[in-house]
Image (cartoon, helix red, strand yellow):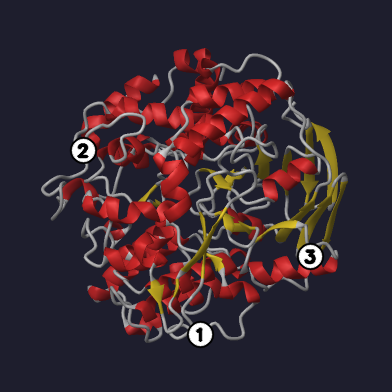
Amino acid sequence: MGWTGQVMRVNLTEGTCTPEALNMEWAGEYLGQRGLASKYLCEEMDPRIDPLSPDNMMIFATGPLTGTCASTGGRFSVITKGALTGAIACSNSGGYWGAELKFAGWDMIILEGKASSPVYLCIIDDKVELLDASDIWGKSVWDTDAWIKTRHQDPQMHISAIGIAGENGVLYAGIVNDLHRAAGRSGVGAVMGSKNLKAIAVRGTGGVKVDDFLAFMTATTAAKKVLAGNAVTGEGLPTYGTQVLMNIINESGALPTRNNRDVQFEDVHDISAEAMAAPSGKDGKPNLQTNQACFSCTIACGRISKVNEEHYTVQNKPEYWHASGGLEYEAAWALGAAVGVKDLDALTYANFICNEQGIDPISFGSTLAAAMEMYEDGVITDKETGGLALEFGSAQALTTAVELTGKAEGFGKELGMGSKRLCDKYGRPELSMTVKGQEFPAYDPRGIQGMGLGYATANRGGCHLRSYTVASEILGIPEKTDPLVTDGKPGLVKAFQDATAAVDSSGLCIFTTFAWTMEDIAPQIDADLPGDWSVDRLLEVGERIWNLERQFNLQAGFTAKDDTLPKRLLNDAAKTGPAKGLVAGLDKMLPEYYELRGWTKEGVPTSETLSRLAL
């Protein structure tokens, strides 16, 4: 069956690595990955603890389809209490690391306590040990990856690591695996750094068994045909990656620009997918070199790019710098339109730094945008920045700031706090484009109303990947809804949230849902696992997970007052585009959403809801 049935519990304080059996009752209720690990976290940890204290747990979790031949079956998640938000955090990543953990025979790794000195966790099948990481503490993710593979003389090892940002407490530091895939959001890398854990290296030589092999092959083969025949998963994403959205969202009047002062970026064509594919420089070679797939993925939306060295030198950099993980939509927006920069090479350079040092580009770009607005207003001056002119549109400001943040030096320490704390410090809290302390991404809720409700109610703070209503409101998937109206959006958001929680717990990539419905996913899980895994059961699992996460946050001190948006989006109308004259209509949607969820007017799940979901 898809679960290995084994969990590795690592006590960093005591230096012990102890195997234990997976709780199969919980697996039946929460499936895996996001859901199952959140259950462990909620059962074993007080939600009120300091996220950077040794009391915080971290769980690296796979899903039952991770490591199988199901398309995109390579995902894993990191679950903890987020350093950036203080809310429950689940950060999802692709690449090959998750599958390798399953091949080694483990569903999850539970990390407790804090090591007395830097260590890394080495897993080679059933041999698990903590090893000294003193020689790589202070090194980048990319140098760490090379060092560990050389030490173990195994280039097929897969490594998840933090860079200098995670070590030095950048509150939105991520965990990077396979050089440029990342569990990037909510500050999971800062939590890892607080535990003196530099990396987890994995090598597995086993496989993953499924419950009904013939039924599984039938279901996965049929599902792959659906992906291949879909315009988004079969054509758009392989050709252009997620950057296919850049011009579309801009034309929709929903591209947050210059800290959400505007909803359209006049230089969008310079940083679009088409610009990445166009010839550049004296050699005529484009920014985009090729696409790349994660484990078992038939979509291949990943980008491999190069920086034009006539523009930005990459001398004395590792070989990876000459062709590495290229811009995806969220990073291109955060490092481009959000700060008004149109220099594609500058964006690519900054993105390489984010991968190299383990920084969430969404939070970094949004924080820099807030700093630029305060600099423009004279609240932040050259005295604070060390002479760095934080002007909107400045490529130099972008690339210098990201290097300072990656190393937590100079004004980079200030930027490393995230925009909420930075804006609070300088007395301008209204300039922080965050929900629950987390910077939200590349969709302005004035132009895509459902995303506003999705941001406001997301359990991990401002996030698009908990309820991607853009699929319906802009792309017409699974059916077209009007992005400029609030009617019907509470039900749409709830449906996306529940379905996404189930997909995130399966080991699959959410991008499959551009083509797949739960009718395509359920047969794959049903053949993978024992028992009956119907669409209805999966949606109930998703709803259970959503309410479990909500309970964690309520116990951590969050209330309905935190289900809101920045005043700029609620009060200042969009200036241009289809949404001109509109604000985010959250007040019209939130009460109905609570009612559909089975929550009180205060946003608390009722006893009837908890009973129905066995919570």
Horizontal and vertical percent position of residue 343: 35, 74
Residue 611 is left or right of residue 451, and the answer is right
Check disc 2: other Cα within 10 Å, few if <14, some if 14-19, many if 20+.
many
Q: Which residue is mark 2?
A: 585
Instruction: Name the residue type under label 2.
Output: Gly
Q: Are marks 2 and 1 in contact (CB under 8 Å)?
A: no
Kind of residue sitting beneath label 3: Lys
Residue 313 is tagged as: 1
Q: Earlier in the sequence, mark 2 or mark 3?
A: 3
Quickly name the residue at label 3.
149
Q: CA distance from mark 2 to mark 3?
A: 52 Å
Q: Quadrant of the N terminus?
A: top right
Percent position of residue 114, x then y? 73, 55
Q: Is 233 placed above or below 255 here?
A: above
Residue drawn at x 49%, y 83% as measured from the top left: 309
Of 440 and 92, the residue lying toward us: 92
Determine the image quadrant of residue 119.
bottom right
Residue 351 as seen in the image, left or right of residue 262 = right
Question: Is any part of residue 83 visible from this angle?
Answer: yes
